[in-house]
Amino acid sequence: MCPSIYKVNKLLFLERIRHAYMDPGNLQTELHSLLIPEAGIYFRQDAECDILSQHVQLPLFSLWINDIFPKKDIVLRPFTPVPTYTLHFMFEDSLWTQSRQNQEYLLEERECNLFSLKPGLHKIPMAKSKKILSLHINIDPAAVPALIQQYPVLQSLEMSEPGSINGPVNQHSYHINPTCDFLIRQILTCHYTGADAQRFLYRCCVDLLLNIAEQQAMASQLLLFSTVINGGAYHDLFKYLETHPYKYHLAGELAYMFEIPAAELAHGFRQLFAISIDDFTHMAKMIFVYDRMASKIFPLPLLAETVGYNDVSVMVSDVETFYGQ
């Protein structure tokens, strides 16, 4: 149940129309490790709560990361000044949100929800024992048609009627699966600035949207029995692909290496991680190459050879295509 006895209200901007960022140099040093260099920051500190918000404006949407440290029992009052679709990822604890109609909705730790929000305030009681990290991607309803045209799978998220509801669009929460974890780690540790950061963060956000859309598209499918009993092997395979982006394997090799039935490998991987093996392998490789290219430390011919390209120009073209350069 949602506590109703908390009296201290704290405003939390989910979106802003105008920005006046804080100088990062004025932030207490123990919080510097949380900062993304490309992000503008807001920090509020008082006797009841500390709130660190980071914002990155991207071409079709905005990215927000909030670290919330309550010192007393408070009521968070999330506020958006404009209609927005918000894809919200929750970490470290769970909270109940309360609508204006006194309907409650659980923001579960390590789950994701897509909200359609009208302008106004919302209500989330938060006990002093909790600490929250939340990441959300705000999508301007006017940008939805362009996104769906570019990525048709996003149609499954049902963002076609902005303003028709004021709350969660999804009937059931989405999982922060290993693919989402991987992408969110890339965002939280992004050290790029300028155009390099914009391209990288935009692509990470797009891939998060695509993963959630894939989860929605597969929502009615039951997990195969073989997927369940081989769950540990699939997660080992995922970790291997994540940490060896420069290696290429045929599907049969991967099935043999991780003792997964070859006929069920592709379907089971997609069921658990909401992405195909080929798409995840390509994503991990592009992230690996992008980082090395941005560092300008590795000679391009050596980098191409390391990740399995015979032609440097093909590698560069693949990266530019993936990141929309």
Image: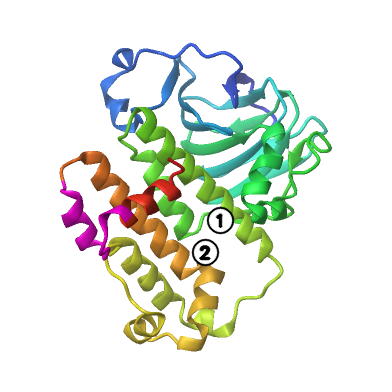
Q: Is residue 2 visible?
A: no
Q: Amino acid at mark 2?
A: Ile
Q: CA distance from mark 1 to mark 2?
A: 7 Å
Q: Which residue is mark 1?
A: 211
Per the rendered image, the range of residues in magenta is 298-313
In the image, what residue occupies the spot 71% across and 41% down?
145
Q: Amino acid at mark 1?
A: Asn
Q: State the image quarter where residue 67 is shown.
A: top left
Compared to residue 107, the image places residue 318 above or below, namely: below
Circles 1 and 2, Cβ within 8 Å, touching? The answer is yes
Colouring scheme applied when the structure was drawn:
rainbow
In this rendered view, identify the residue nearer to me: 215 or 148: 148
Work out which quarter of the rendered image holds the C terminus and state it: top left
Residue 204 placement (x, y as % from top left): 46, 45
Q: Is residue 80 visible?
A: yes
Packing grade of label 2 (10 A; few <14, some 14-19, many >=20) is many
In the image, what residue occupies the spot 58% across and 33% down?
61
Check if residue 153 falls in the magenta segment.
no
Q: State the image quarter where residue 311 is shown.
A: bottom left
Q: Which residue is mark 2?
A: 275
SS for tag 1? Answer: helix
Taking the image as shown, residue 79 lies to the left or right of residue 162, namely left
Compared to residue 230, the image places residue 132 above or below, namely: above
Question: Any mark on residue 297, and which?
Answer: none
